[in-house]
Amino acid sequence: MWLRCASCGHQWPYLRFEIRCPRCGGDWLDVVYDLPAVRRRWEQVLRERPFTMWRYRELLPVREDLHIVTMDEGGTPLLRAENLGLMLGRPRLYIKDERQNPTGSFKDRQASLAISVAREADLREMVVASTGNVAISYAAYCARAGIQLWAFLVSSAPSDKMREVALYGAEVIKVTGTYDQTKQVAAQFAERRGLFLDRGIRSLAARESMKTLAFEIAEQLRWRAPDWYIQAVSGGMGPIGVWKGFRELQAMGLVDRIPRIGVIQAEGCAPMVESFREGLEQARVVRTPRTRIATLATGDPGPAYPVLRRIVLETGGAMETVSDEETYRAMHLLAKMEGLSMEPAAAAAFAGAFKLMASGRIRPEETVVINASGHTFPVEKFALGEAWVHALEAPQAPSEGFLTALDQLDPRSRRVLIVDDDPDAVRLIRRILQARGAFYVEEAYRGDEALERIRRQPPDVILLDLMMPGMDGFAVLEALKADEAMRRIPVLVITARSLAPEERARLREQAYAVLEKGAFTDENLIEDMLAALHAS
């Protein structure tokens, strides 16, 4: 291993822990490896190693394995987003589930490597500034390594996260101010006490740890790179590390390309995205963040922006902003469609990906990996909105009074009939409706079966596919409109068929709305259904 200074290009052997270039004093150092030797080594040993981030130890800057501090972090699942992919028409949409790390976030990768390097350097105390997740991870790994941690947290960090940091034995200092101000206070404290300060994006260990995301994703995709890697960022460390990881894999001949990098920031604190849109080479600092998502509220990205800007331009990637409301909607959608509860900073990546898909930047056939960077503990209060719980008071009277109260827990008053021969499509639509909780859902898989059900018990609204064997959707519409008892039932057509102009004109007369499979969201469906029910 060698160290290389990003400022002057000086390169020297990595023999001890260093944070500055001995020639020019530059503080951004990269690690350089003998990649051909690493590939030969991996061909011999990789298959036998446990699936954790340390299976790739030859490309991580720890010289002796005995210094490694680990809790089997990494090796997280790469999940195919079946329901979301079906709804969005994206069959190759994947979720890198970083919630499965020991303390529940991708920062455990950073902590494991950073604390391993610290132990190898024989550090006994260190200082970190954080909005929550970094402090939790560092506190846990410092506890394991026997290192005293001073954790400076922004006052907007959830109190539950502060308590968890303290639980691991760290000293917790709550700073009333922005995250950038918290970093300044932590730096001043470290300097006065002569303690080592974790340098965030400038830490080579922190950046190197994120490469393991790329290594795992490539291996989980059978040594292929995805077309896109998307992550929400505050300081930008994750995508920078992932890009370097894929670059090293490409240099070793293990993947044939580097994915496009998608960088997502909160609209209320997006110095990198706004500067990128303006073509600036240095980021314009956001002095007063205006987002409720504290984890993404870094107003001064420092040296990360020029690096990320170059990466996005080189890979043909994108930078995008999302509002807090879009983030909370995505958070709720991921929970009810995929069963994944995640923190707002993770959900922001999905909200940004949805916007890139809607704009056409991400094509339907492309393989997309989105980083679900952390879990939400406790559940984010802004994600659910109103009326998310049913209140039930147990009556003092006889049992039939209680049964009546229980009946009130099922408010489903609108009957919906889904008519589609594709079980996956039916499952998706049923899940969207069930998540709203106000509909009684029935299903029919053939046109003639649907008409029989409708005659027996007319629904309030029909969701109809067009392409079915035997009696197709057009024939069902003709039969409905010819029957006096059924002609007034509103019909929403949901189809993957490419419609000719005359077919569109015909549907405008016979259906309330036409939704294209893979091009509508759950909100689109619900809004059109409620409008149809109101109009009827």
Image: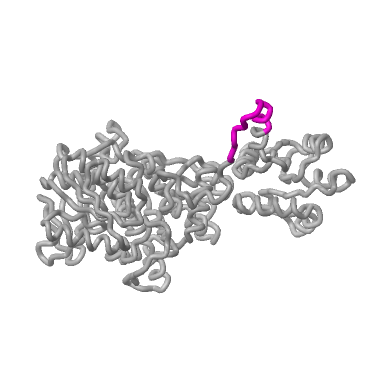
In the image shown, does 284 or 530 lie closer to the viewer? 530
Whether residue 201 sits left or right of residue 397 in the image: it is left
Q: Is residue 451 left or right of residue 265?
A: right
| Residue at figure coordinates x 10%, y 45% from the top left | 122
Pick whichever, 100 or 323, lies toward us: 323
Residue 5 position in % (x across, y down): 17, 61
Total labels drawn? 0
Q: Is residue 56 visible?
A: no
Residue 394 on the magenta span: yes
The image quarter in which residue 129 lies: bottom left
Residue at the farthest top position: 399
Q: Position of residue 391 (x, y in %)?
A: 58, 40
- Residue 342 horizontal side relative to residue 140, left or right: right
- In the rendered image of this protein, does residue 98 appear above or below residue 232? above
Where residue 223 sits: x, y (%)?
A: 37, 43
Q: Position of residue 359 (x, y in %)?
A: 54, 61
Q: Residue at x 45, y 62 (%)?
A: 321
154 relative to 402, above or below: below
**Above-or-below relation of 441 to 114:** above
Can residue 146 be seen from the camera position used here?
A: yes
Residue at the far front: name it: 396
Q: Residue at x 16, y 47 (%)?
A: 118
Residue toward you, 183 or 303:
183
Identify the magenta region. Answer: 391-404
Residue at 29 percent across and 63 percent down: it is 180
